[in-house]
Image: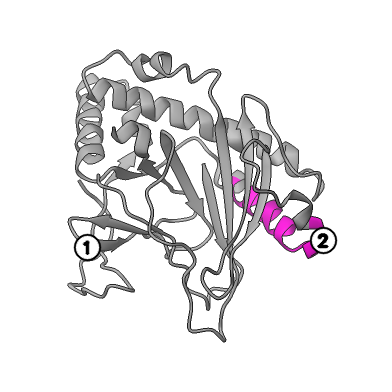
């Protein structure tokens, strides 16, 4: 899971995720600017249709899901069961965390990969990003402050995990397997889930406005939400496409393990 947010929309985050990986929402402006990216239609799944009782309708969604995972390695989900107010509350709580003093945040600063809570602050001359990395499954690990953060993260991560499992079942079907094939083969019940929270501070007085370098996601499957429309980009067929998602939409990346 990944949550990203801006504190000032004057800053343009370049949260860039190159994924090798049909289609339904955005304009094709014909612009081909490396920095700003291209506005194109991207694959969108209506979750109500994904869970439809109509076999023909659901079969079509599963077919599209498999095609989009192969062609884009990426899709967007709308009308999913994670409440918009819970997404907003989770983002608000993490904004409170990042608004704490440096001393409070750096209590969790560590390079030890075995630590279940890790805070990192990028070199501001290179990357304008702070992030918090927490383990949410099988056991939740969360900072003590701000108050009620743990309870909010517990509910949010649980809802997102349920959504992710359902989508992976659909991907299993699209590959011609039983619904629970991926789930059982990778023993997802006991596997680790991680939540990365990205904060992109405003950088109005710097020529560097890069929030994240280009990368592919490690792990199996990444679900992304953010509090602003813009910043995230997807590399597809040699072009960087802008991923413009609404606050109540969730973007899904096929990560390295699933791609293999």
Q: Which residue is mark 1?
A: 239
Q: Which is more toward the observer, 197 or 77?
A: 197
- Residue indicated by mark 2: 103
Query: Where is the C terminus found, in terms of image quarters?
Result: top left
Rendered location of residue 139, percent (x, y): 67, 26
Secondary structure type for disc 1: strand
Ranked by sequence position, the earlier of labels 1 and 2 is 2
- Residue 41 is left or right of residue 212, and the answer is left
Q: Residue at x 28, y 43 (%)?
A: 73
Q: Which residues are magenta?
A: 87-104
What number of labels is visible?
2
Q: Indicate the position of residue 33 as horizontal and vertical percent values.
A: 25, 75
Q: Is residue 90 left or right of residue 1?
A: right
What kind of secondary structure does the magenta stretch mostly adopt? helix
Q: Position of residue 188 (x, y in %)?
A: 48, 20
Residue found 32% across the figure and 54% down from its top: 18
What percent of the width, then of the height, locates residue 37?
A: 29, 69
In the image as oriented, which residue stretches furthest toward the front? 112
């Amino acid at each position: 899971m990944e949550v990203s947010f801006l504190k000032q929309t004057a800053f343009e985050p370049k949260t860039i995720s190159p994924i090798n990986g049909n289609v339904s929402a955005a304009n094709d402006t014909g612009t081909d600017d490396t920095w700003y990216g291209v506005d194109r239609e991207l694959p969108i799944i209506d979750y109500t249709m994904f869970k439809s009782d109509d076999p023909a309708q659901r079969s079509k969604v599963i077919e599209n899901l498999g095609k989009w995972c192969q062609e884009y390695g990426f899709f967007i989900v709308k009308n999913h069961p994670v409440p918009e107010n819970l997404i907003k509350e989770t983002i608000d709580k993490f904004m409170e965390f990042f608004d704490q003093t440096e001393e409070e945040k750096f209590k969790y600063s560590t390079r030890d990969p075995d630590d279940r809570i890790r805070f990192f602050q990028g070199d501001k001359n290179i990357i304008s990003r702070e992030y918090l990395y927490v383990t949410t499954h099988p056991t939740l690990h969360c900072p003590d402050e701000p108050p009620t953060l743990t309870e909010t993260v517990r509910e949010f991560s649980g809802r997102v995990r349920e959504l992710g499992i359902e989508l992976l079942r659909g991907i299993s079907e699209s590959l011609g397997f039983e619904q629970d094939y991926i789930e059982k083969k990778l023993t997802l019940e006991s596997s680790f889930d991680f939540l990365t929270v990205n904060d992109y501070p405003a950088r109005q007085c710097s020529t560097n406005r890069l929030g994240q370098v280009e990368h592919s996601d490690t792990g199996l499957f990444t679900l992304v939400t953010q509090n602003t429309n813009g910043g995230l980009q997807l590399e597809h067929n040699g072009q960087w496409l802008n991923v413009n998602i609404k606050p109540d939409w969730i973007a899904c990346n096929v990560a390295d393990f699933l791609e293999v």
